[in-house]
């Protein structure tokens, strides 16, 4: 039996047929087509300060696809390892430089084997959280808490030609920048402010930093 889900892609363009192999290879999870199940999030992602956009609506048949859901099957360290593989970080100290190699060697999942990846979207706020962890300025527990702040949403990424072939275009919904750009900015600002408040919280002896993990200190499951 087919299992189909409805997905949305925010863009300034109408995209009736996404092309496999096109796009930016330095996105969070590498080359792919990035979507969400949340229509309102897609509308926010569709616009910028100067341009209206479209929420392109699709249907994806996932019944025969191999899916990696990082929010269920992996943990926050797997997520950071994927970002390190595909995006550029500012590594400010030796711990960050060594930590990058450590995380790639120990926590990078074989993500290119999957048709679809589901996980956090590393926009400006989430990316800054990951960068703070790499530079050893916030603990793993704080990072994990931060990713749940601000309701910035998950993304669903088509990685394989098979996944692209299973995607059907439905329609494009027009989105006005005057309405949705302020909502996008508010969501990001709320997440950033929540993170700054959370960062000031009291650390405990059980909070582990990147250098602790590299030294083999046991990680409490609650930190992941």
Image (spheres, rainbow, N blue to C red):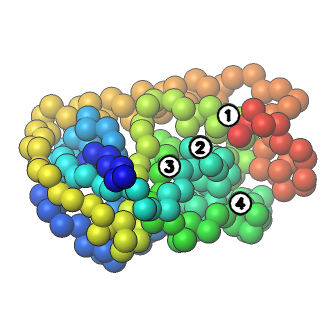
User: Which comes sooner in the sequence, label 1 or label 4?
Assistant: 4
Q: Which residue is mark 3?
A: 119
| Mark 1 and mark 2 residues within 8 Å of each other at the beta carbon | no
Q: Nearer the viewer, mark 1 or mark 3?
A: 3
User: Which comes sooner in the sequence, label 4 or label 2?
Assistant: 2
Compared across the picture, whether 67 is left or right of 172 comes to right
User: Which comes sooner in the sequence, label 4 or label 3?
Assistant: 4
Q: Which mark is residue 142?
A: 1
The answer to which of 47 and 69 lies nearer the viewer is: 69
Work out whether 66 lies above or below 213: below
- Residue 183 % position (x, y): 26, 30
Element marked by disc 2:
loop
Q: Which residue is mark 2?
A: 72
Q: Which residue is mark 4?
A: 107
Element marked by disc 4:
helix
- The residue sitting at 66% across, 64% down in the picture is 108
Q: CA distance from mark 1 to mark 3?
A: 18 Å
Element marked by disc 1:
helix
Q: Nearer the viewer, mark 2 or mark 3?
A: 2
- Residue 86 % position (x, y): 52, 67
- Residue 128 % position (x, y): 54, 46
Disc 3 packing (10 Å; few <14; some 14–19; many ≥20): many
Q: CA distance from mark 4 to mark 2?
A: 15 Å
Element marked by disc 3:
strand
User: Which comes sooner in the sequence, label 1 or label 2?
Assistant: 2
Q: CA distance from mark 2 to mark 3?
A: 9 Å
Total numbered circles: 4
Q: CA distance from mark 1 to mark 4?
A: 19 Å
């Amino acid at each position: 039996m087919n299992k189909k889900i409805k997905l949305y892609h925010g863009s300034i363009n109408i995209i009736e047929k996404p092309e496999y192999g096109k796009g930016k290879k330095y996105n969070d999870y590498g080359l792919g087509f990035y979507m969400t199940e949340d229509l309102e999030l897609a509308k926010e992602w569709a616009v910028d300060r100067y341009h209206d956009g479209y929420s392109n609506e699709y249907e994806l048949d996932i019944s025969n696809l191999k899916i990696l859901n990082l929010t269920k099957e992996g943990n926050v360290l797997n997520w950071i390892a994927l970002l390190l593989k595909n995006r550029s970080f500012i590594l400010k100290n030796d711990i960050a430089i060594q930590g990058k190699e450590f995380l790639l060697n120990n926590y990078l999942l074989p993500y290119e084997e999957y048709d679809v990846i589901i996980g956090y979207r590393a926009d400006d706020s989430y990316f800054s959280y990951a960068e703070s962890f790499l530079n050893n300025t916030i603990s793993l527990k704080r990072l994990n808490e931060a990713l749940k702040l601000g309701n910035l949403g998950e993304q669903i990424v088509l990685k394989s030609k098979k996944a692209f072939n299973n995607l059907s275009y439905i329609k494009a919904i027009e989105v006005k920048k005057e309405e949705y750009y302020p909502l996008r900015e508010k969501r990001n600002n709320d997440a950033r402010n929540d993170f700054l408040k959370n960062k000031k919280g009291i650390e405990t002896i059980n909070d582990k930093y990147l250098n602790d993990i590299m030294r083999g200190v046991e990680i409490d499951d609650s930190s992941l």
